[in-house]
Image: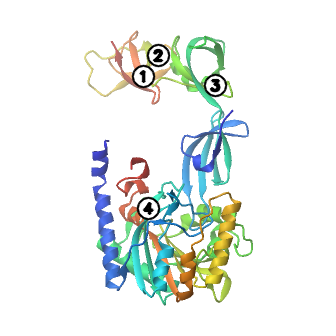
């Protein structure tokens, strides 16, 4: 069960429950006109569907914090459209749909540790580590000796992800990628 | 950034703040005002429905020096000003700090129109001394101090920007919400704007308008969508003031908020108070506007979280 909160607890990043769904406050502004009452203007994002809306709260309004828990899970395998993860503490297995995994699918390799978010004990999404290492499965041959120029070429990773990499990158090499920006960081020796 | 770097980066804003304070003092000294200091810790803050005081060993930190200023006026001090710290519990946002700096000034024998003229001259002087004589751009919007400042009654503003009339339909929730969301963002571009004559229910310590008892002689000064000052012709009737305090206290009690001791000394002083007018202006917000800063944290050396 979530705890009871009041409007003065509202701030960016706070997670609250509205009509049975978890919402995160993505933008927040405190206002207080003249001698008037305090108003708490929020932009809220549904943590499951991603939809956003604006709502203004008053001091007297009360909320329930969203009953969320983050657990470390290891990605085991994919079976059809199901992704199987294992709780690294309890060894319990959890299946996520393609939709729940979302763009993270581009970075999932066997045995990768991720943080999985649960709302009222139901999994709703995962957070990847900031950096992952992926092997290049396809890349056009680069130009010999061209290690300094800023030009890039597309390369395909073992997960199917295609991204721009420096010209000197070759098939079979392992690359460090930033999952937040989707960018190449460096070659792993 | 470490603390030394953060503070060093604020030097321009802190210098501007210093310049503004210096200009304000010079302005009031030239106009024959006396600078005063009144208690920061008080046994009885003004009962306001929506202003919460911070308690300090059974007393309270000042939410505004207003009541003390008026006690001085009641003793015949005819032109006084103060630059004072004020404290309000639970107020934290881009434009709110729980501890902030207020400029208050008061005139015996004046009404709120005289204060409006003071505002024009004071902000004119501040802009001259800080190189803002000509129009400038703040956050992409043009601002300018010279020329005629517009004024609009609260009633007109609601009709025009919110599509309803507060005097016909007194709904304080809707009033505050529409004021913040629909009206304030329109006010004070490029020149400061006076929002005049608040509904009697929001008169606070202001006198009602003789020609129209539904409104009080109270104005708010807006610039660039930001509320900068709140001034009014002061209520000097002790009986009416006692009634309003009682109503505010009852409203606080019903809302489950702390009910502060009645400011008895202030109420007694009202018997001697002649017609007068007074105004409070937020110094931090004024600095923010002239500094082109995006929030108050940038214009005070130590915002609450770094204090």
Q: Are marks 1 and 4 in contact (CB under 8 Å)?
A: no
Instruction: Tell me the residue at 56%/26% (across/down).
Output: A103
Instruction: Give the secondary structure at mark 1.
Output: strand
> Do the residues bearing badges 4 and 3 touch, measured as CB atoms within 8 Å?
no
Measured from the top left, where is residue A15 in percent x and y? 60, 38
Instruction: Name the quarter where the N terminus of chain A is drawn.
Output: top right
Which chain hosts label 4? B
Residue in the picture at 38% in, 11% down: A173
Which residue in the protein does label 4 denote? B100
Real-space Cα separation, disc 2 to disc 4, in angstroms:
55 Å
* Alpha carbon separation for disc pair 1 and 2: 11 Å
Q: Name the residue under label 3.
A: A100
**Are the residues flagged by discs 4 and 3 from a single subunit?**
no
How much space separates mark 3 and mark 1, taking CA atoms? 22 Å
- Above or below, B305 against A97 in this view is below
Q: Mark on residue A157?
A: 2
The residue marked by circle 3 belongs to what chain?
A
Marks 1,2: beta carbons within 8 A: yes
- Residue B216 percent coordinates (x, y): 62, 80
The secondary element bearing badge 2 is classed as strand
Q: Give the mark nearer the N terminus: 3 vs 1.
A: 3
């Amino acid at each position: 069960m979530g705890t009871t909160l009041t409007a003065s607890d509202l701030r960016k990043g706070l997670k609250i429950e509205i009509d049975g769904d978890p919402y995160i406050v993505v933008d927040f502004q405190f206002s207080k006109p003249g001698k008037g009452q305090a108003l708490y203007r929020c932009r809220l994002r549904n943590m499951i569907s991603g939809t956003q809306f604006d709502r203004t709260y008053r001091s007297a309004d009360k909320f329930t914090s969203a009953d969320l828990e983050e657990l470390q899970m290891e990605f085991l395998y994919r079976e059809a459209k199901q992704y199987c993860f294992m709780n690294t503490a309890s060894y319990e297995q959890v299946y996520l749909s393609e939709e729940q995994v979302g763009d993270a699918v581009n970075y999932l390799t066997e045995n990768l540790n991720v943080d999985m978010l649960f709302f009222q004990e139901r999994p709703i999404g995962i957070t990847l580590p900031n950096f992952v290492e992926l092997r290049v499965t396809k890349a056009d041959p680069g130009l010999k000796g061209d290690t300094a120029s800023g030009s890039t070429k597309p390369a395909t990773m073992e997960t199917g992800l295609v991204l721009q990499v420096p010209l000197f990158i070759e098939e079979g090499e392992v690359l460090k990628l930033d999952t937040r920006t989707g960018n190449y960081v460096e070659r792993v020796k | 950034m470490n603390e030394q770097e953060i503070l060093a980066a604020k030097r321009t804003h802190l210098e501007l703040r210093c310049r503004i304070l210096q200009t304000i003092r010079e302005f009031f000294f030239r106009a024959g005002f006396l600078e005063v200091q009144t208690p920061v810790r008080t046994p009885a803050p003004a009962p306001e429905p929506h202003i919460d005081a911070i308690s300090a060993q059974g007393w309270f930190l000042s939410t505004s020096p207003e009541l003390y200023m008026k006690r001085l006026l009641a003793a015949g001090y005819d032109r006084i000003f103060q630059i004072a710290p004020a404290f309000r519990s639970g107020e934290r946002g881009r434009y709110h700090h729980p501890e902030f700096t207020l400029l208050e000034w008061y005139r015996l024998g004046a009404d709120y129109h005289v204060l409006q003229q003071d505002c024009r001259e004071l902000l004119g002087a501040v802009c001259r001394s800080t190189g803002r004589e000509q129009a400038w751009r703040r956050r992409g919007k043009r601002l300018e101090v010279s020329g005629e400042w517009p004024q609009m009654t609260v009633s007109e503003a609601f009709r025009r920007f919110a599509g309803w009339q507060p005097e016909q339909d007194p709904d304080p929730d809707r009033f505050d919400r529409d004021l913040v969301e629909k009206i304030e963002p329109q006010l004070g571009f490029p020149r400061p704007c006076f929002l005049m004559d608040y509904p009697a229910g929001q008169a606070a310590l202001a006198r009602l308008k003789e020609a129209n008892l539904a409104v009080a002689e109270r104005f708010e000064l807006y610039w660039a969508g930001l509320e900068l000052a709140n001034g009014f012709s002061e209520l000097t009737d002790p009986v009416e003031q006692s009634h309003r305090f009682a109503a505010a206290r009852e409203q606080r009690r019903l809302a489950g908020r702390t009910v502060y001791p009645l400011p008895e000394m202030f109420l007694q002083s009202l018997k001697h108070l002649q017609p007068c007018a007074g105004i409070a202006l937020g110094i931090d917000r004024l600095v923010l506007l002239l500094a082109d800063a995006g929030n108050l944290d940038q214009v005070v050396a130590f915002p609450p979280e770094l204090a």
